[in-house]
Amino acid sequence: MATGNPLYANPKLCKHLADYKLRHALSCYKSLQNCLKTTPNGRTSIYRSETKITRCCSCNGYQGRFLLCLICSSISCSSHALLHAQSENGHDVAVDIERSELYCCLCSDQVYDPDFDKVVVSKIMMDMPNNTHVDDGIRRSSKRRKLNSLMDLDLKKSKHLVLMRDRREKSCYPLGLRGLNNLGSTCFMNSVLQALLYAPPFRNYFLSGRHDRETCRKRSSDRLCLACNIDVIFSAVYSGDRTPYSPAQFLYSWWQHSANLASYEQQDAHEFFISVLDGIHEREGNGRIPTKDNGDCQCIAHRVFSGMLRSDVTCMTCGFTSTTYDPCLDISLNMNTNNLSSIDVANKSVRPNENSTRCTLSACLDLFTRPEKLGSDQKLYCQNCKEKRDSFKQMSVRRLPLVLSLHIKRFEHSAVRRMSRKIDWHLQFPFSLDMTSYLSSSIVRSRFGNRIFTFESNEADTSPEFEIFAVITHSGMLESGHYVTYLRLRNQWYKCDDAWITEVDEAIVRASQCYMIFYVQKMLYYKANEDWSCTPMSSRKDPFFPIAGCC
Amino acid sequence: MRNSVNRPPTPDAAEDLGKEPMFQEIINIKLIESGEKERLMELLRERLIECGWKDEMKALCRAFIKKKGRNDVTVDDLVRVITPKGRASIPDYIKAELLQRIRAYLVQAAV
């Protein structure tokens, strides 16, 4: 894994462990393998007979962490491990009985050895009933997805468009920032459009003229093509004209596409986002554009936004896991409602009050990938046990898209109580996001306990590091709220509130109530920022003038 | 001074090794032998994850490591730092549930 954390692959062995390995090779690891006891949820411990109470050889204590010396098999508690190593020469390395993890008594610290973990993991896999998904990770040769697909979205072809800038433009705002008029509760549409207008690979595709309106119209008899309408918007917004634009044509097309949402009422921005991408796919995909060998749709909506999620359902009795993969255009996250703080300890209930809530995006992502125990009314059929069993489910991200869209579920609809409400808590989100720990390879690895073991995966081709470029915020109530988009261009944040675009400080963005957050792969973000110059080559050094629509 | 309370003499620290197992120990032995301790540990793990305690501890560890520097921290340091906070922040309902389970077990084991 080229982009993986190198510590995972090559941990530094302390000198005591290195000595031990020189002297004893791997024979002791192998003999330990026979004493390992695995459980369906992945905890591996050293097997001790049921009746024997673990006691420290020095203090006879029975509480705490116990370490088994790899040389003489004597057990010490964590406070006396050092004593044992000092009294017996060469008895440096021990293994934690409950967790099967290596510990160096002289360094008084946990140590990591890939060879040891390989032994533990192969024992776990031997004990697992028919787990095909694990073999997939190890046996499959990584098909390198050609990075050429990114080159298609290269901006070099569209550079010539930059030079044809409108002379009317006096402000030093970056190219393309243009307000969108509200056509009657259409802030949900405007906010999503602004985010799409600035998604680097999406923008590059349209600005380099990849969607040809002429050939598209010739090819189809009816006029409806959302991608054509979007192309019109791109041309209008990047024309250099700063007066607010009315995307009426697009709205009309979208109404025709999603007839059930056609009204002047406020709609949900996330629903709109998904329906627009679907609309583009319908026209561009579906055999229109040939799919690649692995069956991925090549329409622009999917190439930019589509990722893949992995869902593992594990039987709690035998550990058999069944895995399914689902493509996704975005990830919807529940807000982490279980936050404890020391203030709340006195409370009997666990629900946090508004003041002590510390909701963060990483907490929501943790919640998304946490193993969820399915209720006893949701017992699933286990193929190994041949009957319905309690199980738990765990989600992870198998393949990251170029643009990662995260949707925060703030609108709670309760069918039981027949009411809907909005969750107003503030969510803290980072500007740089590292998705490594939510990838399937990391999640699967963590099931084996604390191991250094790399599963080969196809994810090496897409970097897990992302940079934020757009945030859609919602303010107000469920029925009557307002959507606003914040865009980040060359480290300056801009607020796009329908027709009004203003520069804002990043503190305002951090304090806002985010609803949808858009991240793009770091490499694409920096490329986009360096290619598009922001300041016009003006000879006079005056500050920007406000132009109608840009205040 | 007359002893108003009948109390056995305070045991010396030096004599501890040879003493009879204390009540707590006996319970612990019984729990382990019957396998009940394993079940209780699983239950406790589940509850602590559900209520967010584990995430809290993770956050504390991260904060500590950030402060000290990644290469200067040992596992023992982390355990030492978070143990008092961890013990203090366990919700009461979890303690109550475990106590209830242990009591129920002892009652049926004594029979």
Image (tube, coloured by chain):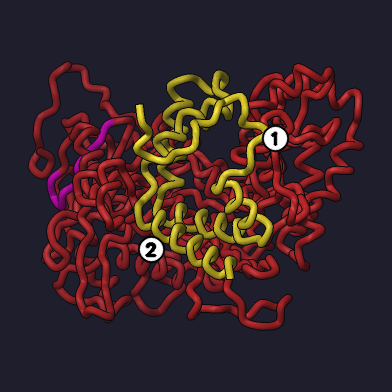
The residue under label 2 is which amino acid type? Ala
Relative image position of residue A150 (x, y in whole percent): 55, 45
* Quarter containing the N terminus of chain A: top right
Query: What type of secondary structure mainly makes up the magenta span?
Result: strand
Relative image position of residue A184 (x, y in whole percent): 11, 66
Look at mark 2 in the image and give the residue it sits on: A227
Relative image position of residue A57 (x, y in whole percent): 74, 32
Q: Residue furthest bottom?
A: A387
Q: Is residue A5 above or below residue B51?
A: above
Q: Earlier in the sequence, mark 2 or mark 1?
A: 1
Residue sitting at x 52%, y 67%: B107
Q: Chain of mark 1?
A: A
Q: Is residue A344 above or below residue A8?
A: below
Q: Are marks 2 and 1 on the same chain?
A: yes
Q: Is A174 or B102 nearer to us in this picture?
A: B102
Residue A548 visible in rendering:
yes
Residue sitting at x 78%, y 23%: A92
Colour of chain B, in one word, is: yellow
The residue under label 1 is which amino acid type? Cys
Look at mark 1 in the image and give the residue it sits on: A56
Q: Is residue A422 left or right of residue A369?
A: left
Relative image position of residue A357 (x, y in whole percent): 26, 46
* Quarter containing the C terminus of chain A: top left
As for residue A499 lying within the magenta part, the answer is: yes
Residue sitting at x 48%, y 73%: A375
State the image quarter where residue A411 is shown.
bottom left
Q: Which chain is red?
A: A
As for residue B15 lying within the magenta part, the answer is: no
Whole-angstrom CA distance, mark 2 to mark 1, is 71 Å
Q: Which range of residues does the magenta coloring cover?
A: A492-500
Q: Is A539 or B78 nearer to us in this picture?
A: B78
